[in-house]
Image (cartoon, grey):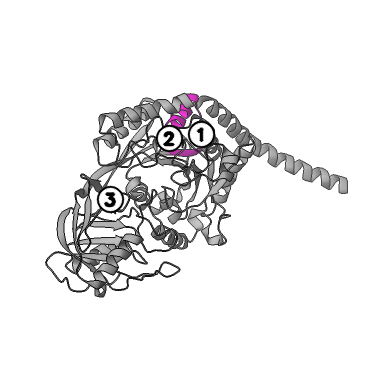
């Protein structure tokens, strides 16, 4: 009897294994074929095309500019040539561009001219203006600062004294509410401009680049804690006169996402493979994120050329206006019907894959980086992470987890409970000696020293990073395209709980590149 039972169990297991083997074998075969077809030269061909677009358009490919429109035309054209049906999804967004060098100076007492970028910065969506007037501190400025961020300066209408002169400029401390709320309160109180200084805790000392969330009618700049403290103490002793000059374009424009689906695959098990196509205003964005979008584009083209027929539909997405706050991906997710959202199994996000001083960062789907289990990604995100980790481990390539901190286009998917994951080669953070020992490269400098700068050109790429992370991306796309069982349980999740957690994270550090909300 025991022998018969053992044989029966073995037969059942064998039956299950044989049933799973065809799909598994197909995924393995497709992965190997796709990785052989996906070459660095193929990726670089798209990167060079995007560089040419930037060269024709003042060195930028930002959403709302001709450079972005030409980037859309290139990507859509390549996809159409390969036989994809391409959708250009239009949406409106608040465009922002600084069109002149700003200036900020204290006229009296103790005249001093402050230097742009190093001592002050124009905040995203600041209005334009040339102001000479009196600097007026708000209530609730905390000097010395508390151990933890906690200033409510400018968060309430009652924080603003009545403007003492016709041109009054509010001095506000960074703190617990959004920069947008501070600026709108100042404008409503009759102030002509705003200076927001950093709060003073470790990590909140220097000049920062912040976003005001939407176009504002008055000029708004940021400055360091030290300069804010100096201005505040002088204002406590008597009137402080300053001059503030800001020149910006801040208006509503239309841009587009580029979306292309595979012809085959289950429509109730869609794998969204995305990355942002736009650059910042300051540079051409060939690593950020030409590297991610060029890799995704080449994966799409090679899948078509090889005749790979996915079990699950693959949707290739090239998002617009990411650099101003994930706007394209947010628009896409927000405009999905309930059923369309449930049809999406997972999102793979590839934002920067070619950093010159790279690391192999894998998004932390299981929340191992944090002590709170609620900081893990939605159901299935741990599975996505494991696919990448197993792939790299099989090639003896070291990795590190990177958190879901709201800095890229996985954010809107996570908010509605869709599993997410992906790869990242590093941005402005400094590589540690331990990371240099693990990944190679140089300790003590940024993973991408040209991050969000004009030097983010075709020369700002690592071929090794494109090769290794590109192959891993291709493997994951095929792995999930041919997966029999679902990853995401979005239809059964309490998405509101995920959205609340994500909103909390995004309020703390919403936009990549330091575009802070508060």
> Residue 465 got which mark?
1
> Foreground residue, 166 or 180?
166
Do we see residue 303 in this rendering? yes
Q: Residues within 10 Å of mark 1 (few under 14, many from 20)?
A: many
* In the image, farthest residue toward the left: 166
Q: Secondary structure at mark 3?
A: loop
- Residue 504 found in image quarter: bottom left
Choose the circle earlier in sequence order: 1 or 3: 3
Coordinates of residue 120 in the picture (x, y in percent): 29, 54
Query: What residue is at 46 percent from the left and 37 percent from the top?
Result: 355
Point out the stretch of residues depicted in magenta: 296-315
User: Are the residues flagged by discs 2 and 1 in contact, CB closer than 8 Å?
Assistant: yes
> Residue 291 got which mark?
2
Q: Secondary structure at mark 2?
A: helix
Coordinates of residue 101 in the picture (x, y in percent): 22, 46
| Total numbered badges shown on the rendered structure | 3
Query: What residue is at 28 percent from the left and 32 percent from the top?
Result: 70
* Closer to the eye: label 3 or 2: 3
339 sits left or right of 94 in the view:
right
Choose the circle earlier in sequence order: 2 or 1: 2
Asked if residue 480 is positioned above or below residue 105 in the image, the reply reads above
> Residue 115 got which mark?
3
């Amino acid at each position: 009897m025991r022998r018969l039972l053992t044989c029966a169990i073995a037969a059942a297991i064998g039956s299950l294994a044989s049933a799973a083997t065809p799909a598994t074998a197909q995924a393995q075969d497709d992965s190997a074929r796709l990785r052989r077809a996906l070459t660095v030269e193929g990726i670089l061909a798209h990167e060079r095309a995007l560089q040419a677009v930037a060269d024709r358009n003042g060195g930028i490919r930002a959403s709302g500019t001709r450079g972005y429109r030409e980037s859309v035309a290139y990507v859509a054209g390549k996809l159409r040539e390969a036989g994809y049906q391409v959708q250009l999804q239009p949406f409106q967004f608040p465009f922002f561009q600084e069109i002149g060098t700003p200036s900020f100076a204290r006229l009296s007492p103790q005249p001093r001219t402050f230097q742009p970028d190093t001592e002050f910065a124009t905040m995203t969506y600041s209005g334009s203006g040339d102001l000479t007037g009196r600097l007026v501190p708000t209530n609730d400025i905390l000097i010395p600062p508390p151990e933890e961020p906690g200033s409510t300066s400018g968060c309430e209408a009652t924080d603003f004294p009545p403007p003492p002169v016709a041109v009054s400029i509010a001095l506000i401390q960074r703190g617990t509410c959004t920069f947008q709320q501070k600026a709108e309160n100042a404008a409503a109180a009759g102030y002509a401009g705003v200076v927001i200084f950093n709060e003073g805790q470790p990590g909140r000392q220097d000049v920062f680049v912040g976003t005001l969330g939407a176009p504002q009618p008055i000029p708004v700049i940021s400055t360091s804690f030290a300069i804010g403290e100096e201005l505040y103490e002088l204002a406590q002793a008597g009137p402080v006169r300053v001059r503030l000059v800001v020149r910006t374009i801040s208006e509503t424009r239309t841009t587009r996402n580029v979306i292309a689906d595979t012809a085959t695959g289950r429509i109730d098990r869609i794998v969204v493979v995305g990355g942002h196509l736009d650059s910042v205003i300051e540079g051409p964005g060939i690593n950020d994120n030409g590297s991610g979008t060029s890799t995704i584009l080449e994966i799409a083209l090679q899948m078509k050329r090889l005749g790979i027929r996915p079990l699950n539909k693959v949707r290739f997405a090239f998002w617009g206006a990411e650099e101003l706050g994930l706007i394209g991906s947010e628009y896409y997710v927000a405009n999905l019907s309930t059923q369309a959202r449930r049809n999406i199994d997972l999102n793979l996000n590839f934002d920067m894959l070619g950093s010159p001083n790279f690391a192999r960062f894998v998004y932390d789907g299981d929340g191992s980086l944090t002590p709170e289990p609620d900081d893990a990604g939605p159901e299935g995100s741990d599975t996505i992470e494991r696919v990448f980790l197993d792939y790299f481990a099989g090639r003896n390539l070291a990795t590190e987890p990177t958190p879901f901190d709201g800095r890229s286009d996985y954010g809107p998917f996570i908010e509605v409970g869709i599993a997410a994951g992906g790869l990242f080669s590093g941005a402005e953070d400094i590589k540690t000696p331990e990371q240099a020992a693990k990944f190679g490269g140089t300790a003590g400098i940024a993973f991408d020293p040209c991050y969000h700068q004009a030097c983010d050109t075709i020369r700002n790429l690592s071929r090794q990073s494109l090769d290794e992370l590109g192959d891993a991306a291709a493997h994951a796309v095929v792995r999930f395209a041919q997966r029999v069982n679902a990853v995401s349980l979005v239809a059964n999740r309490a998405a509101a709980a995920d959205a609340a957690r994500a909103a909390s994270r995004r309020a703390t550090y919403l936009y990549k590149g330091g575009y802070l909300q508060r």
